[in-house]
Image (cartoon, helix red, strand yellow):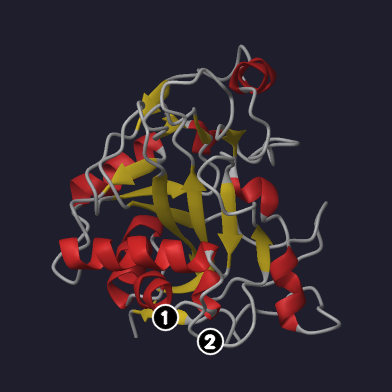
Amino acid sequence: MERIKVTQEDKQAFDRDGYWISPKLLTDEEIARLRAAHERVWMRDFDREGLPLFHSYAPYTHDLPHLRKVDNSWLINDTVREIVTSPALGEMAADLLDEDSIRLWHDQVIYKPGLNGQVSRIGNVGWHQDYGYWESSNTSNMVTVWIALQDTDLTNGGMMTILGSHKWGIIKDSNTFFEPNLDLLRDKFATENREWVEEPCIMKAGQASFHHALTFHGSGPNLTADPRLSIVAHLMPGNTAYQEGPQRHPNVQLLGPHPYNGQKFDNEFFPLLYSRS
């Protein structure tokens, strides 16, 4: 990962489209370790005491397909921690966002079940903006790094972005990750003033999609027989602080019992990945 540097062309593509797909960041060995970490997280086989702070577990059976998501798994799995706190990942994010430092906001481990050809909305991720959940952060200049742990395209529920949608600003009620009806959400968010151009993120295992916190994105069902696995790092500028907003993200409680406007997310729960100084 340390060998990958963001070029001026990469930065221009990110600014224009709202996302950028990296070269392969992970070795085959790292991919295999992360796939094993996935399995261990769902089996609650943790490296450290405690639980991930916010989670959506489902009964662990391949016969009961269900979209699964765990936040802050870096606290209990050392392999996930190693990847999502990588200084190289932080440097790439800093270059794309034009920031001097980068911290981890939180991670996600996401499991999309394979439906083996079944026509269903199970596993769909609704069109949404990540910042729709993060308005308790005082900047929207944040980025999500979505790392594929297998070759990923539309057949196995790969992510799609809406080109240039990060230029629309924050859209009301865009916290719709768990709404599986993509058509309904398209009708809701696509207006005469917003050109709705869907672009699939076609990725090889080990590549990452860096998308801006305001970029609309979502995904359809995984029609293959195998689950689609991903590790996600949500990253923020190093000086990001708390602000009162329309909703409070659960991570705010990590600031202590009485968070205040302007309090920086700079304690041990928000590790510094990279600083130019």
Quadrant of the frame with the N terminus: bottom left
Furthest toward the right, the residue is 258
Residue 109, given in percent of the width and then of the height, sits at: 49, 59
Q: Residue at x 61, y 16 (%)?
A: 183
- Up the image or down, 245 lies above or below 275; here it is above
Residue 255, given in percent of the width and then of the height, sits at: 73, 81
Residue 262, given in percent of the width and then of the height, sits at: 73, 75
Crowdedness near tag 2: few (<14), some (14–19) or many (≥20) residues, C-alpha within 10 Å:
few
The amino acid marked with disc number 1 is Asp
Q: How far is the residue under mark 1 from the one under mark 2?
A: 8 Å
Crowdedness near tag 1: few (<14), some (14–19) or many (≥20) residues, C-alpha within 10 Å:
some
Q: Give the residue pinned by disc 1.
A: 78
Q: Give the residue pinned by disc 2.
A: 48
How many numbered discs, if any?
2
**Does residue 168 appear left or right of residue 31 in this picture?**
right
Whichever of labels 1 and 2 marks the residue nearer the N terminus, that label is: 2
The amino acid marked with disc number 2 is Arg
Residue 247, given in percent of the width and then of the height, sits at: 81, 54
Q: Are marks 1 and 2 in contact (CB under 8 Å)?
A: yes
Q: Residue at x 56, y 20 (%)?
A: 194
Q: Residue at x 34, y 56 (%)?
A: 96
Quadrant of the frame with the C terminus: bottom left
